[in-house]
Image: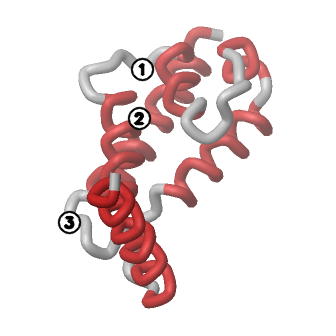
Amino acid sequence: FFHKTFLANTHIQYIDLTMRLGIADNRQDDDILQTVQKCIILKEHTPENLRDLLAICEPHLTTDQVLTNDDLRLDAMKKLMTSIHPSNFPQNEDAQNVYEDIQCFYDICCKEMLERD
């Protein structure tokens, strides 16, 4: 019991120290970037896949809203792009590439949705 309590307290102190010093925990950075990458890697540019991507920041967004509501779709994309902006991940060398890939995926999805109409 003592050993587990000591480890838990040490971890809490580490988190507190990193927060006070402004040191980011890169594991969280990697998690969101990996989640975003999984949404687009080898995926077709469909409204459903775009909804899955935008659902990272707007979980209640529906495929119908992605198709019909440009404002909601754009707001969700802005929120996503703000959260994955490379300046938020200075220690991650892949952040810029992920950011650009997401923008490209979004642009192609929107273009294909317009062509379907």
Q: Residues within 10 Å of mark 3 (few under 14, many from 20)?
A: few
Q: Amino acid at mark 1?
A: His
Of residues 115 and 104, which is closer to you in this image? Answer: 104
Residue 87, placed above or below residue 31: below
The reply to whether callout 1 and callout 2 are in contact (CB within 8 Å) is yes
Which residue has dot 3 on it?
A: 93
Q: Quadrant of the C terminus?
A: top right
Query: In the visual, does 17 lie left or right of 51?
Result: left
Look at 50% across and 87% down and name the residue there: 20
Q: Disc 1 designates what residue?
A: 45
Amino acid type assigned to the residue bearing label 3 in the image: Glu
Q: Is residue 70 above or below residue 75?
A: above
Q: Are marks 3 and 1 in contact (CB under 8 Å)?
A: no
Secondary structure, mark 2, is helix
Query: How many numbered badges does the structure rendering display?
Result: 3
Q: Tag 2: residue type?
A: Phe
Residue 65 in the image, given as x and y percentages of width and height: 75, 20
Residue 102, above or below 54: below
Q: Is residue 77 left or right of residue 90?
A: right
Q: Residue at x 42, y 20 (%)?
A: 45
**Residue 95 visible in this rendered orientation of the protein:** no
Work out whether residue 96 or residue 114 is closer to the camera in this orientation and state it. Answer: 96
